[in-house]
Amino acid sequence: MQYSSQAVAKPYFIAAIGLFTGQVLFGLIMGLQYIIGDFLFPAIPFNVARMVHTNLLIVWLLFGFMGAAYYMIPEETETELYSPKLALLMFWIFLVAGAATILGYLLVPYATLAQMTGNDILETMGREFLEQPLLTKIGIVVVALAFLFNLSMTMLKGRKTSIAIVLMLGLWGLAIFFLFSFYNPHNPVLDKYFWWWVVHLWVEGVWELILGSLLAFVLIKVTGVDREVIEKWLYVIITLTLVTGIIGTGHHYFWIGTPEYWQWWGSVFSALEPIPFFAMTVFAFNMVNRRRREHPNKAATLWALGTGVMSFLGAGVWGFLHTLAPVNYYTHGTQITAAHGHMAFYGAYAMVVLCIISYAMPILRGRAANSEKSQVLEMWAFWLMTVAMVFITLFLTAAGILQVWLQRYSATPIPFMAAQDQLTIFYWLREGSGVMFLIGLLVYIASFFVGGEPRKAAA
């Protein structure tokens, strides 16, 4: 059954894809700046391009999560959203605030932006991924509280399902852990210690609950497998996620001045973090193999399976490659870290947002699924983006291994910039793969504008 208030998800999805496109474009700019150092300088220096690239990543994923929640919760609770008007108001506030912040990064020197936005009242700026001005951070908190109020009130008056509860737990955790972005102690060890309470406990903690619930919702819809079976899998996955992810925060504490025991705790528990991602992969394929019906939306099913595989490879395998303290001693902060980051974010979070958009947008437009022609195009987009991301990861991994050897492990290590010069071929290959990824994203967008008759479900 469809609910009219689910329509508020549509502008969130459109904004998410638009911001995702901007993130990829700034990624390509940064990629060229690795090779041609003065490309677009001084208009867009590397530090600004990087700040825009990473901030757009966070903002577009938040738009995607919010849209997904506004679509899912009415269906899971079997009741209309508490206040569609509040949802739309928060959409515009978040979009305007986000756009103003990005323009601030691009048009105003960062130190001036800090002065203009009250950073002297409460110092929160200048930290990686949390560069947002104080006013923007306050705006994010206001939007998040209104969003959670809206969904929580909807939950209270409707049916309570395990999937909805896990989703809400993840969303509340996202908001609560963001509050640590306001805590900026002067001691650099304390600063980094609590900085990871936002960054790690988001992406390797509460965001994984959001990922699991979104994937479970789509798999119920496209496979017809009993809800009880899928919910049991979800319980196993979130338990493994929280146990390994929370204590696994210690793998970020190796070299920042924290006690030595974190090298053991961090190594052991972060080495276990691939297990929930492997479980997620098995879960996705198992549910599709046990399906009771052939859903007309084949593209959404492909995205669901791809999410399981790519999150396991990116977050699990590539995370494990450099998570043990004796290995991380040499690899920390090299291109191996970038390789892991790119595939993990794409596989775990970008793909699940693209999956829910692929499933929900045709329904929001009045059809069970897009046309055959549209879905073929979308599946081309899936393969173009996914293969491109695999190549980006492999080229960055090769660059990282060579960087470790030349700069850190060799008997005659060379300086950082001299090592970077030796990696140029890998940066060119990474840039080419990035162009391929952008083409795939544009094909994904184009697929929603292709007409024709919707697919018919198999009998």
Image (cartoon, rainbow, N blue to C red):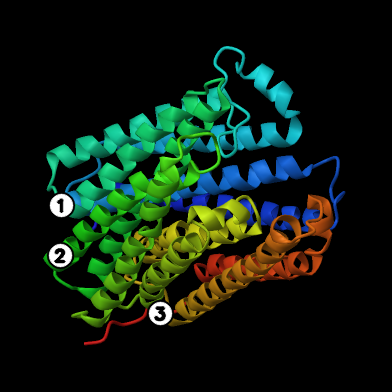
- 311 vs 124, left or right, is left
Q: Residue at x 27, y 70 (%)?
A: 283
Q: Which mark is residue 161?
A: 1
169 vs 263, nearest the viewer:
263
Q: Earlier in the sequence, mark 3 or mark 2?
A: 2
In the displayed orientation, state which residue is furthest to the top: 121
* Residue 11 at least partly seen: no
In the displayed orientation, state which residue is furthest to the bottom: 459
**Secondary element at image label 2:** helix
Q: Answer above or below: position of 274 versus 209.
A: below
Q: Which mark is residue 227?
A: 2
Q: Earlier in the sequence, mark 1 or mark 3?
A: 1
**Secondary element at image label 3:** loop
Q: Earlier in the sequence, mark 1 or mark 2?
A: 1
68 vs 345, nearest the viewer:
345
Amino acid type of disc 1? Thr
Within 10 Å of disc 1 (Cα), the crowding (few <14, some 14-19, many 20+) is some
403 vs 424, nearest the viewer:
403
Task: Give the x, y percent position of residue 33.
Answer: 80, 53
Q: Rounded to the nearest whole Å, what is the CA distance between mark 1 and mark 3?
A: 34 Å
Mark 3 lies on residue: 453
Q: Answer above or below: position of 119 versus 400.
A: above
